[in-house]
Amino acid sequence: MFQQAPVLLLVDDSNVNLEILKDILKRYPLLTATNGKEALLLATAEPKPDLILLDVVMPGMDGFETCRKLKERAVTRNIPVIFITGQNDSDHILKGFEVGAVDYITKPFNIPELKARVKTQLTIKMARDQNLRLLQKIELVNKQLTDSIRYAQKIQNASLPKQTYLDQVMPEYFVLLKPRDIVSGDFYWVGEVDSRLLVVAADSTGHGVPGAFMSMFGVAYLNQIVGYQSVSIPSQILDRLRSIVIDSFQQTESSEVKDGMDIGVLSIDRTRKEIEFAGAFNPLYIIRNNELTIVSADHMPVSIGEVDRPYHNHIIPYQKGDALYLFTDGYASQFGGPDDKKIKSTGFRQLLIEHHHLPMCEQKTIYDQFFEEWKGNGEQVDDVLLIGIRL
């Protein structure tokens, strides 16, 4: 409903017509004008009218031109206009609608019809104004929520390894992280224990805020397991991480909360010239001499699951020049291309084979550009994380 009684602006160069209208519509607060120029001034003054009844035929600025000017101005364009016309031909009425009128009434006035048309337009305006207020409230809440999420993004980014640290401890590398939303469920972690360099790529359950919360837990748990407990064998890291997740979220086989992570943990031992890998759904790719080897992951999530056995630890001697890739499933899952299909694992592997010989920084640019071109104008379906390492 209107917070106050709706105000009507009556515009007619005939004082007789104005008096008749004033008598018919006396239940409303009324403003009157006898020409277009005066009407434009009253429409922008306080109190602003909620509805304008505008005579078409007036000396100087006629009703059509007056209405056109009302619709050009931001402050008055949403005020509905009903034309008052003595002509009932379709061309005349159509021109009124073209310049922005919402309805028309003819002279001499049919009192019940006039009242009904005024009431209808006021009801429509009241509903539109209410919708506008609700939209403004929604936009305000959305802005506040977005601002909060953007601040959460800063916190999440602060939990990830700093580039200066990565440049110190990593061999030639790149990290491509593309959140689907402002914050990401995918995350990466890097640490050192003795001669081992540990690199983790993880995909938390969910996207956006829920996924970001889980990723923060994942970072904290890895800091505890590796940083404080000095566990450096990938399979043992996953075993302990799974136990912590199950205990922290009080997960049971019958519980509804089974959130967790799909994750790959890589250990690079520079002294022994070998790598170790353990994965929960996320495998490791090694490209050597233009051949890609898949180091498989266990089909067990880092959470409660149907199978609860120790994770398998792969030990592989490495050679100088080997290209290693840790990743989540977001890249291969992206829809797009000429047939709006997924990139899929086969397409993803072929892309890596084609470009693995290039410097890692160039590869990152290529994989990022390919992803964006494949996605095109479509929506990103998942968080994306891809880490490349040259030994």
Image (cartoon, helix red, strand yellow):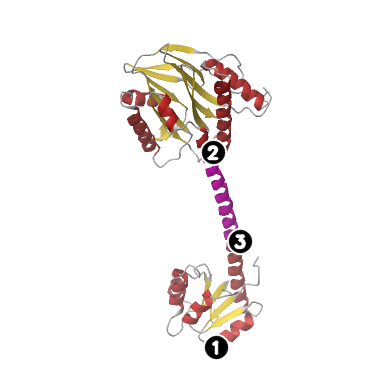
Q: Position of residue 145 (x, y in %)?
A: 57, 47
For the residue pair 193 and 137, the one nearer the viewer reads as 193
State the separation of the CA atoms marked 3 and 1: 35 Å
Residue 358 within the magenta-colored segment of the rendering = no
For badge 1, the amino acid type reads Asn
- Residue 231 position in % (x across, y down): 55, 17
The answer to whether any part of residue 337 appears in the image is no
Q: Amino acid at mark 2?
A: Ile
**Real-space Cα distance between discs 1 and 2?**
69 Å
Residue at the spot of label 3 = 130
- Percent across and percent down for residue 21 are 59, 82
Residue 377 visible, this angle: yes
Residue ID at (65%, 71%): 4
Please give the name of the residue rendered at 39% of the width and 13% of the height, measured from the top-left corner. 318
Pick whichever of labels 3 and 2 is earlier in the sequence: 3
Residue mark closest to the camera, 3 vs 1: 3
Label 3 with label 1: CB-CB less than 8 Å: no
Query: Which quarter shows the C terminus?
Result: top left
Q: Give the mark toward the camera: 1 or 2.
A: 2
